[in-house]
Image (cartoon, rainbow, N blue to C red):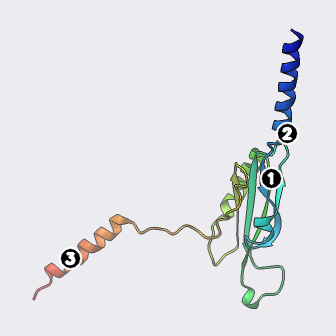
Amino acid sequence: MGFLCSILFVFTVILLVMESGLSMECYVCINQEGNKDKCVKTTMQCLENQLSCITNISYTVPPYWSPFGERAHFIWKACISTEECEQLKEAAGATCQREWYMDWRCVECCQGELCNYYVTLIAPLKMPNFGLIVLLAMTSIWTRVSLPV
C-alpha cells in the first residue's frame, strides 16, 4: 500500500509540474503602428484564467503630424479571458467597418498558442452577385437581338 501511495504522489507531482508549464502564450504590444516589430516578436505567458489572445486594431489619424492627415493602423495585443474578449468584440462591433475613408476599431479573439500573429487590416473583398451578372448578360443579349437592323 505504501509503494502505491508513493507512486501516486510522484505521478501527481509530475502532472502538476507539467500543467504549470502548459500555460498559453500570446503576442503582446501596445499601440504599435502596423503589425510588425514588437507585435510579432514579443510574447507573454498568459495567466491561468486567460485562455484567449486579443488583437485590437484601430484605424485612425495618428496622434502625430502626418501629411494630409493620413490614417494608420494602430494595434495592441494581449492575453485575456475568453468572456472579456467577447465583450470587447461585441462593444466594438458597430465601429468595425474596415473602410479606408473612415475611422474604425475592431477586436479579434482567438484561442491557441500564439494565435494572434496575423491581423485583418482590410475588409474582405465583396464578390459580385452571380444573379446580377446573369441578369445583365441576358439584358445585353436581349437588347442586341431586339434591335432592328
Q: Which amino acid, mark 3? A: Ile
Residue at 30 percent of width and 73 percent of height: 136
Residue 99, picture quadrant: bottom right
**Is mark 2 in CB contact (under 8 Å) with mark 1?**
no
Where does the image place residue 21, in percent across and percent down from the top left?
Answer: 83, 42
Q: Earlier in the sequence, mark 3 or mark 2?
A: 2
Relative to the observer, which residue lies in front, 26 or 75?
Answer: 26
Residue that mark 2 sits on: 20
Q: Earlier in the sequence, mark 2 or mark 1?
A: 2
Residue at 63 percent of width and 69 percent of height: 98
Q: What's the CA distance linking mark 2 and mark 1?
A: 17 Å
Residue that protrudes farthest toward the top in the picture? 1
Q: Earlier in the sequence, mark 3 or mark 1?
A: 1
**Which numbered tag is attached to residue 60?**
none
Residue that protrudes farthest toward the bottom in the picture? 67
Relative to the observer, which residue lies in front, 79 or 45?
Answer: 45
In the rendered structure, the answer to whether residue 122 lies left or right of residue 131 reads right
Q: Which-is-in-front pick, marks 3 and 2?
A: 2
Q: Which amino acid, mark 1? A: Cys
Vertical position of residue 89 compared to residue 120: above or below: above
